[in-house]
Amino acid sequence: MLKKVLIANRGEIAVRVMRTCREMGIATVAVYSELDRNALHVRLADEAYALGGQSAAESYLNTETILDVIHRSGADAVHPGYGFFSENTEFARAITSRGVTFIGPPPEAIEVMGDKISSRLAAAKVGVEGVPGRSEALKNAKEVVKFGNEFGWPVAIKAAYGGGGRGMKVVNSADEAPAALESAQREAQSYFGRPECYVERYLTRPRHIEMQVLADAHGNTRWLGERDCSAQRRHQKLIEESPAPNFPDEVRRAMGEAAVKVSRACGYVNAGTVEFLYQDDAFFFLEMNTRLQVEHPVTELVTGLDLVEWQLRIAAGESLDFTQEEVRREGHAIEVRINAEDPAGGKFIPTPGTITRFDQPSGPGVRLDAGYAAGDTISQYYDNLIAKLIVWGPDRERARRRMLRAIEETTIEGVATTLAADVVILSDEQFVEGTHSTNWVESELDFTTLPEAVTAAVSVGDGQVRKDVTAEVNGRRVTVALWVPEFDDGLARAQSTAAKPRRQHHAGVLGSGSANVVVPMQGTIVKVNVEVGQPVEAGDTVVILEAMKMENSVNAEKSGVVVSINVAAGDSVSAGDTVVVVE
């Protein structure tokens, strides 16, 4: 059995893995950036090591520093969580080449399936057809246009080494192709460390259904059941459930068998998810996620299996101790993702800041997997998932009502969240009847009744500064870094500033018609689209802002001419900052 596991991740998934490790008697090692030094996953770990830096590239994507921590901590295994390095072949090889166990598939399987292009080819070889598309990386936007003209618009550009909707852009016409490809490549590079993208047909009203698999190193592969992940915004999931509603059992079995074929085709070992699009009684291979999924708890609640436990047991060389026929699925489970976003008007604007209050739900059939607690700060530099709320019920309707009750019991203050939007989704007739699709949230639901969140524009810093102090530890002279409250004029009192109110309208919404184009959230400017002297129309995008790993267009609120530009690509901005002036 494994003795000490380093979790190369942060937030909710790091906490989730630690809990199962503790139950199994396995020691845990956390890593953290400068912004995460007091984070929940750091507080819960048996040991914690600083990576330095603030952004993901400086910290959680710093291979050499993580490898050094593995050596210093004596960890004999690494769990990558999801995102970051979880589907990175080079990272997996760097781990295994040092004799350390990678809790995931072999690097060769990641190489085939982590690359969405090669995974399409591998699936096709075993008779599992994918959505029609180009199985090669895009060189330029002209290739997108050619594909769209041949197969019809809209088309989807996707990150070749990504998942979870990151680096995906829907292109409705040839004119949109250059900007869409550029944006997809930026997001892919930022979140996955690789910019390659490919193109495929965009199905207009599909359901997103994925199949959970477990495979050991002894040739046993099992499909555990499906999850319906069709309630999405920005091609990222909001609500997941299992089993899928209105899903024929013969299709379920065929999809499960197809998932096993795809897994065996690449020599897959450990937990994985094979994703499909389902439309008009047919399903198409979408991709395989060579990692644990965010929504794995819904499968755990209906099967009674701890998927993280099985990840650890398989990584330690154990065999699956159940047959396909012995897999049991009982009742119905629903998960909602609680993201730090303001859903008013359907905009889902990211809202980094500090959680000032977090009242958690409880009661029969309720589970909360959280990565934050009251007092913790959600940074603009990382994913905005605060927690996952999961419920189980004996049938879908009772699970749905239980989820609504659990949401009522949940209070989060300090940042806006998606909980209000979750209530709208769960209460809509199409969700109740199980007839919704992947584009239904953005194209058909009405969020205009949701009030804009009134939150404080809280700095992502924690009001602390570094002090290097020389000390003796067991008689050995060492220099240690202490993080202490900032001092004002030598007085030992923490510096405090009054929080200024957040603007009461979003960028991109034609509100006051102000000449000053201001940003609605903290973030980093990734592109300036205008020049001084350039005419613009109301609604034109003037800058693109990245916050919480999502790109957001900031638009002019009045027509006129650009008279000044206050930012450049790479600049950090705060909520309310003026970036462009139009007169």
Image (cartoon, rainbow, N blue to C red):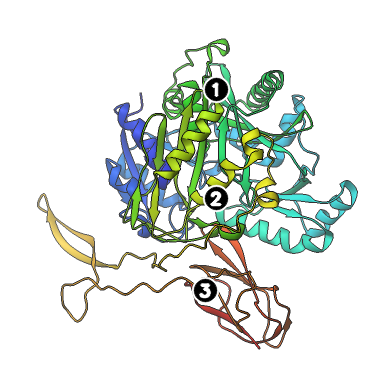
For the residue carrying disc 3, how many other residues have a C-alpha within 10 Å: few (<14), some (14-19), or many (20+)? few
| Residue at image mark 1 | 215
**What's the distance in space between the residues labelled 1 and 2, CA to CA?**
36 Å
Residue at horizontal 51 percent and vertical 56 percent from the top: 341
Q: Nearer the viewer, residue 88 or 568?
A: 568
Residue 114 percent location from the top left of the image: 62, 39
Residue type at tag 2: Ala
For the residue carrying disc 2, how many other residues have a C-alpha within 10 Å: few (<14), some (14-19), or many (20+)? many
Horizontal side of 306 relative to 269 (left or right) equals left
| Residue at image mark 2 | 421
Q: Earlier in the sequence, mark 3 or mark 1?
A: 1
Residue at horizontal 28 percent and vertical 43 percent from the top: 47
Residue at horizontal 49 percent and vertical 49 percent from the top: 419
Residue 195 percent location from the top left of the image: 64, 54
**289 is higher (above) or lower (below) than 196:** above
Q: In the rendered image, which quarter contains the C terminus?
A: bottom right
For the residue carrying disc 1, how many other residues have a C-alpha within 10 Å: few (<14), some (14-19), or many (20+)? many
Residue type at tag 3: Asp
Do we see residue 285 in this rendering?
Answer: yes
Look at the numbered disc 1 and give the secondary structure of its residue: strand
Name the mark nearer the viewer: 1 or 2: 2
Q: Please identify the residue farthest to the left as the structure is shown.
A: 475
| Residue at image mark 3 | 571
Do we see residue 80 in this rendering?
Answer: no
Residue type at tag 1: Ala
Q: Nearer the viewer, residue 533 or 59?
A: 533
Residue 102 percent location from the top left of the image: 46, 34
